[in-house]
Structures are given as C-alpha cells and as structure tokens.
Amino acid sequence: MTLPQEFKERMERFLGEEYEEFLESWNRETAQALRVNELKITLEDFLKLSPFELCQVPWTKAGFYYGKEERPGKHPYHEAGLYYIQEPSAMAVGTLADAKPGERILDLCAAPGGKTTHLAVSMKGEGLLVSNEIHPTRARILSSNVERMGITNCIVTNEKTESLAERFKEFFDRIVVDAPCSGEGMFRKEEQAALQWSPENISMCARRQEEILKEAAGMLRPGGTLIYSTCTFAPEENEGSISAFLDSYPEFSLKKVSANKLFSKGRPEWIGARPETADTFRLWPHRLNGEGHFVAVLQKEGEMASRESSWKMQTVERSIWKLYKDFKKEFLHRELEGIPVLFGDQLYLLPEAFPLKGIKILRPGLHLGTVKKNRFEPAHALALALKPQDVSCRCSLDVEEAKEYLRGGVFERLGEKGWQLMLVDGYSIGWGKQAGGMVKNHYPKGLRKN
C-alpha cells in the first residue's frame, strides 16, 4: 500500500534503525482472529467443537488467529454468539482492563463492541456495564453485538460524553476510553485512514482526546481505574495525551501492570512527555502478529467507598409482569435477576437502578420480550442469553440445519406445543414455536441470511 510520505519520514525519525523492519511489516497480510465468548462456551469445549484451524493469540487466553481461508463470520456458531471476530492487537485492551465481576464499568467509545464484549466476559454477568457510542448507526451495531453475545448486564447508550459526565459524577469503578484517533496503526487494514492522514488531523485528535479524558476523569470513583487506548503510533495522541492529562489531573497516576513480553514500552522521549509514560504499552506490527495499538492504565487516588444509588425505578404494572411470569413458569427454569422496565411494549431487565429519562438509550439491559394483548412473546436477545438447561422445551439442530434456520426455514419435529429454544450443537441461536408437528421459525427477519 502507499503510505503518506510525511508519515514515513516521521516514523523513520522516531524508529531509527528499526524503521526498515517496520516498513516491511506493511507488506505482510493482516492477522485475523476471534475471541471465544466464555459467557456461552468454555475454551475447552470450543476447541473441541471448532471447525477452524486456530492458533493462540499470545496476550489473550480466549483469543485465536484463524487462517485466511476460514470464514467464521459465515458460520452458525457466529450467530449463536460463541465468538467475536476482533483484530488481535485490540484484544490487548480488554486484557489489560482486567474487569471484575460486580463492578460498574463504562466503555465510553464502545462500537462496534469488541471491548464491551471482552469486558462482559470478565464481569461474568455480574455488575453494571454501560456501553456508549455517540454515532447512532454504530450504536445500533454495538447493541446488536451485545445481543448476539448473550450479555445480560449491559446498557447501551447513544450520548455525548459531556452529557454522561453531567449525570454520572464519580459513579464508575472502571472506565475504558478507546479514543477516536488518527488511525495510523490501522492503515494496513483501512486504506481510507491513510488517505485522510495529516499532521493537522493528529493535532485535532489530540485535542478531542483531551476533552474525552477530562469527562472520563469526573465519572471515575476514587480508587478507580481508567484504561486509555488508541490505534495510532502518533506520540502526540499517546504519550503526549497521557502526559497532558497527568499534568491537569494530579490525582491520577500510571499503574505498573504486567503485560505480554511482545508489548513494547511507551516512548516519552519522542515528544518530551513525562518520563513515567514509559509505563504505557505500544503494540508494533513488526514485533507481533497484529496491528498498531497503544494502551495506558491509570489509577485515580483514593479508596472506594460503599456504593449507593439515588435513582428510583418505576415498577412495571403487576398485570404486565404477570404475563412474563406466566411465560417463565411454562418455559423457563432460570430466574433472571434485574429490575423490570417497560419501553413502549418492550420489556427489559435493568442490571441495577439507572436513570432512564434524559438519556438516549438503545438497550436498557436484557431484552425479555414484547408485551402483547393477554400474552408475552420472548425476544431474540432472551434466547441468546439462555442455555439448554434453562428451558423446558428445545429443538436441537446440526450445523446444516442451523444454516437453514438462519435462512428462515421450518422443521418437522414432534414435541410439546409452544416455544422452543433452537440450539446449534447445543448452543442457543433463537426461538422456534412448535405447532402441528412443525417448528415455526422465529429468527428475526432482519437478521436472516440469503
């Protein structure tokens, strides 16, 4: 590919004798990888089941490279949410974030969902995960991926950072800022980013990052952790942004965390940044099998006090909740935890009390289903959050049958009348409904494959 001349001159000045090796890396094919969704399947079971040729991503235990001839995005296991296709270097963010069950976590620039889904696995369904994306179209993609991966404790918002900062002062235990950047590290994958490159764009991105970090700082509780990442090599947006942030917010410091030996240290000398920014991480395409990335892990001083929520939730009418409870009694064996809320005729379970008014929310927790006159119809999201043992009735499909199901096919099956959890090789993929010796297809029409 053709790289901007001024970009090459900058990188040669920064890298010195490493530059030729760096330049040569642009001629290599990009690495392709997936990350196993341990909310739905164990690594051991996935490796037994997987039809793909896989090789471990060294810095993420659930991450695996796959061959260029493989097409995991086309396989029914993808629609069942057994894995998320993600650029391997980007997996470093979720690994270094080190999320814990029970925390309140904000993914501030979340689309399309790689970091969010990684954080959710680490949280094991416990706590509150708020995933925000300012661009509406990208926010819908994020919401769809949260659904596909069977995540039950995530609220998806579509807000400006400053709007969230006004509402959530010192609220979150952990915040991930995968900041908008000049994208130098992704030139090999996204040639358009190279065409748009300029020193002026780097400066503009650095200013935008400064604003985002300022808002994030106010939303983090004392003792909390802030993870900052970019996919650029530009020191102005990496060590420079972190150095400026530390100058403005002395209550923050860089955490010394262990990382994979393939990760390189930060380079404060490239921009005259604070010396401690050497305790950040750079991922170089000539040193590992992945694209360019930068990650910093920061700690806010203080100790975490006990958490309280001042928000009160309006309860769902008893008659509406009874419709779901009647469905649950007949078809479900699992008690799902959360606060029931109604959005129009859509019933959701909030992970915890949360202000719903005045915030653009795409997905307020787990979508249970639609409340219709005198009946309840379960949502696709609910199916993807369930396991075979959670339901009374299920319909097992092999891979070829699952492909037909994803196209909208129906199946001849004898069984009890009513809802069936559709399974591909034992993993939920959607709903069907048994009637007259047939299982009718309830896979969402907008998701069906040609």
Image (spheres, grey):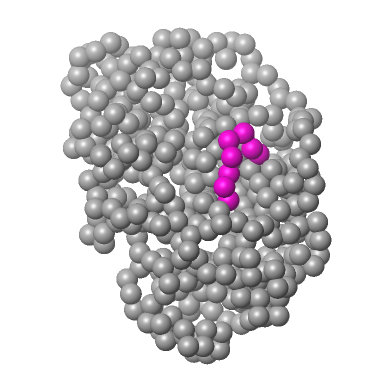
Q: Quadrant of the C terminus?
A: top left
Residue under the image location 41 percent in, 10 percent down: 330
Location of residue 437 with respect to 201 vertically, above or below? above
Q: In this figure, what is the number of numbered marks?
A: 0
Give yes or no for residue 102 being in the magenta stretch: yes
Q: Main secondary structure of the magenta part?
A: loop
Q: Position of residue 442 (x, y in %)?
A: 34, 28
Image location (x, y in percent) of residue 14: 56, 84
Residue 325 or 113: which is nearer the viewer? 113
Is 442 positioned to the left or the right of 89 in the image?
left
Looking at the picture, tell me which residue is in the foreground, 215 or 408: 215
The residue segment tinted magenta is 97-104
Q: In this picture, is 205 found above or below 421?
A: below
Q: Is residue 116 left or right of residue 422?
A: right
> Relative to residue 142, is residue 339 drawn left or right?
right
Residue 31 is covered by the magenta coloring = no
The quarter of the rendered structure image containing the N terminus is bottom left
* One can see residue 71 in this view: no
Indicate the position of residue 237 as horizontal and vertical percent values: 64, 71
Viewer-nearest residue: 194 or 49: 49
Measuring from the top left, give residue 228's x and y in whole percent.
63, 59
- Quadrant in the rendering for residue 208: bottom right
State the residue at coordinates (80%, 47%). Answer: 302
* Vertical order, 55 against 4 (above or below): above
Residue at (63% x, 81% y) in the render: 270
Would residue 163 be seen by someone viewing this image from the given angle? yes
Residue at 32 percent across and 31 percent down: it is 427
